[in-house]
Image (cartoon, rainbow, N blue to C red):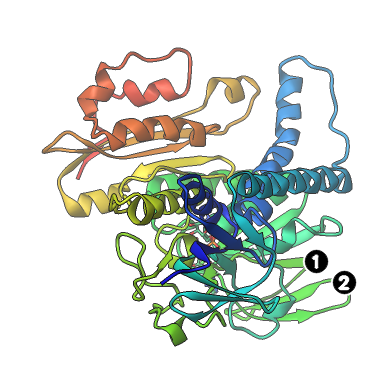
């Protein structure tokens, strides 16, 4: 049977574009459909604009520090319009890069919504229909608001990059990556930030000591963090929104931002109709090769709700091409993924938290918390944390957790050693780079505790 395409990719985000490009470069005839902007969540409404906003938000602190270092300068006002214009110019440029990557690899692109007609047929909103030997779902996810009265009044992360003006006050609901990152960003940009999280501590699932330090530092930076707090209703008032807490208290804010999680984009695509099995959250269920319950259809990235991170989606895309187009079945390795959360302070982490490791086997915990030189000199009281979780039996480093300026950069490198199975003694044998913060990761001699 002959098909219009060897591969039809639905979704032009990081995962879909990479898979389309690599398959086409290998000689496959490839098409890709995207209903919105090329680059997807990461480039257009996630990692990239978020990180640029992190940079923007850190300048008041840098200016204060510069004064302590002898510079005679004063911070002026933040010009949101000027920043937003540059931000969107940069995102337009990056979208162009993504389009060109596809074009230069010989991928046919369709700016249209795609749905499935059968196991080998993609139907576009333009009315066109194409057959494909393989279909790859890479449609990502989207933010969700909780199901409560007035929730539609609240913003979600997509909206933050398009605000007309920065509000004077904002309530952020949630305690995950997005809530905590934007709490720091908006606080740095001068917004009075209140954060409500329903649980006992932000960043559930990560190392407790690290979460505790991040929460303390966020509070010290001026964020009004309320734990064990949730809302039951939102009402529009004259100049803002009134929220009623589950404990009955009422507060008014100029804006409300729901950072209450994301959901896979699988609605109305005809997936279940053609036999693609979906999970409880609407995610596409796949095996270790990213194959769905329909053999010709694969899925990668956030739509599968495995590990929802850009580099993981890219890895899954590469493994898919290797498996399907290069005859080299490659399962995706989801073990020991290093990651950074761009809270202020930044958090870099790989492997098991102290709590999870202790449940698994006897461990030693090496940890140090101190004031870093650069900030201490400027009179700041910020603390950093360096922490290693070590297996008593194998001596392997099971987890590494860093809360510090630049922790994302540090954990990328520490992640290599941890992924290679380095032992505590391997860390110890490595000479310190002095004077740095990260040297502490190779100079911790005595366990702080065992478990
Ligand atoms: P998360 O799932 O991480 O966090 C959602 C938060 O909202 C949790 O604190 C959750 O509470 C809370 N919540 C959920 N439902 C409700 C509700 N009905 N009422 C009140 N609170 C609620 O989602 P995010 O949106 O923050 O991020 C999504 C994913 O995107 C992340 O998991 C991550 O994979 C990725 N991401 C990665 C980044 C990075 O790498 N730096 C940055 C941003 C996103 P509870 O804990 O109690 O469930």
**Horizontal side of residue 378 vs 175, given as left or right:** right
Q: Which mark is residue 40?
A: none
Residue 224 drawn at (x, y percent): 64, 56
Mark toward the start of the polypeptide (2 vs 1)? 2
Q: Secondary structure at mark 1?
A: loop
Q: Check the picture and name the quadrant holding the N terminus.
A: bottom left
Q: Is residue 247 visible?
A: yes
Q: Secondary structure at mark 2?
A: loop
Looking at the image, which is closer to me, 101 or 305?
A: 101
Give me the residue at 39% from left, 46% from top: 209
Q: Which mark is residue 239?
A: 2
Give me the residue at 37% from left, 72% from top: 285
Q: Is residue 189 visible?
A: no
Task: Please tell me how crowded label 1 is: few (under 14), some (14-19), or many (20+) other residues with Cα within 10 Å.
Answer: some
Give me the residue at 62% from left, 84% from top: 148
Looking at the image, which is closer to me, 275 or 410?
A: 275
Image quadrant where residue 232 sits:
bottom right
What is the C-alpha distance between the residues marked 2 and 1?
Answer: 6 Å
Whether residue 383 is situated above or below residue 443 in the rendered picture: below
Asked whether the residues under the numbered discs 2 and 1 touch, taking CB atoms below 8 Å apart as contact, a structural biologist would say yes
**Horizontal side of residue 446 vs 348, given as left or right:** left
Task: Please tell me how crowded label 2 is: few (under 14), some (14-19), or many (20+) other residues with Cα within 10 Å.
Answer: few
Residue 290 drawn at (x, y percent): 36, 62
Whether residue 243 is situated above or below residue 394 in the rendered picture: below
Whether residue 402 is situated above or below residue 426 in the rendered picture: below
Q: Check the picture and name the quadrant holding the C terminus.
A: top left
The residue indicated by pointer 1 is 254
């Amino acid at each position: 049977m002959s098909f219009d395409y060897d591969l039809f990719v639905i979704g032009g985000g990081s995962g879909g574009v990479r898979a389309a490009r690599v398959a086409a470069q290998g000689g496959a005839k490839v098409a890709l459909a995207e209903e919105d902007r090329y680059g997807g969540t990461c480039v257009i409404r996630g990692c990239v604009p978020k990180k640029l906003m992190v940079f923007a938000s850190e300048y008041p602190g840098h200016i204060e520090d510069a004064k302590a270092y002898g510079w005679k300068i004063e911070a002026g006002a933040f010009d949101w319009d000027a920043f937003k214009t540059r931000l969107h110019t940069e995102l337009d440029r990056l979208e162009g890069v993504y389009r060109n990557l596809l074009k230069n690899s010989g991928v046919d692109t369709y700016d249209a919504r795609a749905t499935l007609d059968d196991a080998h047929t993609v139907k576009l909103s333009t009315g066109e229909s194409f057959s494909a030997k393989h279909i790859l779902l890479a449609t990502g996810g989207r933010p969700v608001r909780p199901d409560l009265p007035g929730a539609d009044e609240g913003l979600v992360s997509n909206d933050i990059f398009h605000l007309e003006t920065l509000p004077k006050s904002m309530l952020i609901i949630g305690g995950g990556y997005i809530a905590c990152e934007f709490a720091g960003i908006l606080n740095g940009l001068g917004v009075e930030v209140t954060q409500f999280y329903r649980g006992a501590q932000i960043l559930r699932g990560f190392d407790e000591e690290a979460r505790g330090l991040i929460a303390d530092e966020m509070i010290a930076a001026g964020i009004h963090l309320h734990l064990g707090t949730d809302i039951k209703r939102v009402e529009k008032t004259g100049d803002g929104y009134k929220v009623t807490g589950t404990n009955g208290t009422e507060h008014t804010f100029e804006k409300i931002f729901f950072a209450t999680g994301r959901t896979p984009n699988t609605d109305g695509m005809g997936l279940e109709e053609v036999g693609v099995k979906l999970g409880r959250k609407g995610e596409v269920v796949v095996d270790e090769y990213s194959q769905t319950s329909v053999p010709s259809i694969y899925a990668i990235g956030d739509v599968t709700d495995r590990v929802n991170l850009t580099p993981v989606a890219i890895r899954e895309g590469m493994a898919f091409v290797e498996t399907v187009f290069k005859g080299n079945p490659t399962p995706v390795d989801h073990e020991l993924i290093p990651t950074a959360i761009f809270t202020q302070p930044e958090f870099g982490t790989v492997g098991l938290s102290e709590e999870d490791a202790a449940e698994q086997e006897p461990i030693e915990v090496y940890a140090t918390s101190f004031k870093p030189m650069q900030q201490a000199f400027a009179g700041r009281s910020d603390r950093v944390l360096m922490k290693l979780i070590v297996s008593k039996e194998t001596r392997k480093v099971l987890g590494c957790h860093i809360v510090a300026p630049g922790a994302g950069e540090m954990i990328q490198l520490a992640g290599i050693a941890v992924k290679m199975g380095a032992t505590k003694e391997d860390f110890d044998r490595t000479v310190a780079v002095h004077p740095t913060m990260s040297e502490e990761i190779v100079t911790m001699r005595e366990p702080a505790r065992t478990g």
